[in-house]
Image (spheres, rainbow, N blue to C red):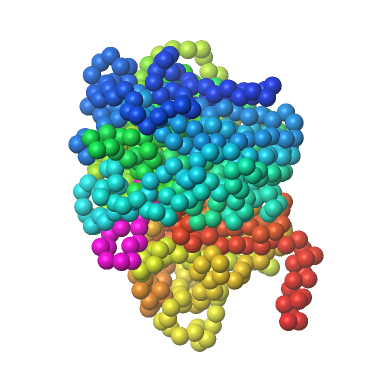
Amino acid sequence: MRTSRRGFWTVAAGLAATAVGWGGGRVVASVRGETPGRIGSGDDPHGSSAHGPQRPGSSPTGNVPPAAADIPQGRGITTTLTPFLDALRVPPVLRPQGQRLTIELRSVNRRLHAQLPPTRLWTYGGHFPGPTIEVRRGQRLEVAWRNVIDDQRVPVTAVEVYAPVGVQPNPYVVPGRSGGTPRADVAAIPPWLVVHLHGAVTGAGQDGWSENGQFPGETQIVEYLNSQPASTLWYHDHSMHVSTWTLFAGLIGMYLIRDDEEDRLRLPGDDREIPLVITDRNFEVDADGRLTGRLLHKVTYADAAPPHITAGFRGPYTLVNGTIWPYLNVKPAWYRFRMLNACNTRTYHMMIIDEETGRPVKGAVRQIGTDAGLLPAPVTVDSPLILSPGERVDILVDFSGSGGRRLRLVNVLDDNPPAPPISRESAPGVPTPGLPYPQMMQFRVAAGGGADSFIPPAVLSSSFARLTYGALPADRYHRIVATKVLGGRHAEMWEMAEVDAASVRIPSDGVVQLRGADGRLRTFKRISRNPDDTVNFYSELGKCEQWTFINVATALHPMHIHLMRFQILSRDVYDVSGFDMKLCGTTRPLEFKETGVVEEGEKGWKDVVRLGDAEVVEIAGTFVGGTGRYAYHCHLLEHQDMGMMRPIIVFPPGIAAMRLAHQRTA
């Protein structure tokens, strides 16, 4: 899938919630704008799987019939839940005053929508998402992640079902098993868990290596250095082979680092600075077709004959901060939103529309930050805001011109394979035809309020420096990674070495030739394809790294590198028809077609890069602040667990020199 925003219409993108203070060792959750006594507003530690009140056809206000726009598309396809019935929930905020913090991993029952029975979840601190941890730059923090989950197995039903290409409705939009048999291997997954702070600068022993899981009764104790600029990080389970279902069960939370540079900007704060976590889910149904609230991980495959290569999970229901299609009351003022895509697979292309006109709200959004820090200057977002799994954006949204109106955040592009391609464009304000359940959340803008004197600053990060090819040192490391799908195998990630074409057989398995924009023909040979293959990538602390990602398939891969903040150097589009999926090699070279677009909002510091279909993307960065064994991987959880994760080892300079000396004398 193309990751560029070219060819789309104007978009405003933003979500809302509110921060909650922490002090005195007590944590209090908050829900903004909630009607007192409304069902589904809180965790229910005693909830059962019995059906809660069902109010089909009720409106967000509860006293008038719903407008047509308030009823999910696909009535008759899936069980109806009323959009915008529940207020947006806000995770509690933890601001540690000392150097130690304990967070329990706990099982809870919680309603994810007022019309749903409680759902069994695995959580951090009893909340989904977990508490937002907030620290200052340089504030060392020791966290004890104490596993007290009282379930023996993950609270998720997993099924795989056949879906011929073009079938409508695709089973992925339908609640219930669709005839699939629950997977016994998933049903046997125990609460063996390990926490990874995504984007953190920390030692490898503190990074949450995927094979270092903890059982209930055990505690993972880590120290986070927080020696990095202000940024939006997140923490989640990273257990080997099973994070597809452990994150699905709820093990997700945000982590904010603040510093003096950010403070000087006087950005919107308190109840107008709001972290948001976006996920999608599906649920089981009972014999009467009613939603039970039980989490259902249903994926599809397009070929009836084995092997069954499944698509990643995409669910019909979008949750924001753990609530399906919530609403948020906002003032006609500027808000700051920290947005995280914590989905397994779905990439969102988001826009804000005015419910009355159906048109985009123009000129209201400024992007001020990326995954790993502030941009040098605000970027006006005039096209759909794209967010793939693992990515974060820091944005400002101006509601001052929408007083008294209701706005809606919608997803405008369905990225689900193996359905046939659908139009990548649509009329302004109208979601792509065929996209089920485009709504994400609603903003209810107050008619009046105090004057807002905030003006977005012209300069954000004066310390930011843009990386270019010409500025990279000549002795940098250069890594080549190729990604593929199909060909009778699940998605793969190959480490490649450049070789002389005369040294390999062409064509053959694992050999890829590429002709770049300069006309030069290069030949690469696969040196690994599985997580347990020999370690090939060794790095030196503080030394520049250039990575080239080559995607020979029509599937997006958000690529994440632990410990490294990087910048995108280029994104180019290639003709990849010369790659033979069954051979697993090129029968003719991959050919450069056109220079792709690195959006202005992508030019900041990042730790996840979207690698679109038939794209070659190059990045540059440096490993700083930690040494040891780390990982890089695709952040589509199903791909990560299927094998798209590999180790990389970072040595201090003196140790790296000794290793090279030993290699030369071996």
Which quadrant of the view contains residue 261?
A: top right
Using the image, determine if residue 463 lies above or below residue 93: below
Drawn side of residue 198 relative to residue 306, left or right? right
Secondary structure predominantly adopted by residues drawn in magenta: loop
Residue 320 is at least partly visible in this image:
no
- Residue 506, x across and y down, in percent: 43, 83
Residue at 21% x, 48% y: name it: 168
Looking at the picture, tell me which residue is in the foreground, 559 or 50: 50
Extreme residue toward the bottom, this view: 502
Any magenta on residue 566?
Answer: no
- Residue 5 x %, y %: 40, 47
The magenta-colored residue range is: 300-314
Residue closer to the observer: 270 or 239: 239
Name the residue located 22 percent from the left edge and 39 percent from the top edge. 77
Depth order, front residue of 37/325: 37
Vertical relation: 25 (above or below) 99: above
x and y percentages locating residue 101 in the rendered image: 69, 34
**Furthest residue toward right:** 654
Identify which residue is drawn at 35% across, 50% down.
182
Residue 638 left/right relative to 458: left
- Is the residue 305 above or below the residue 45 in the image? below
Quadrant where the image shows the N terminus = bottom left
Instruction: Name the side, left or right, on which 494 lies relative to 650.
Output: left
Residue in the picture at 27% in, 22% down: 55
Where's residue 616, x and y in %? 47, 62
Q: Is residue 167 visible?
A: yes
Position of the C terminus, as image quadrant, is bottom right
Q: How many marks?
A: 0
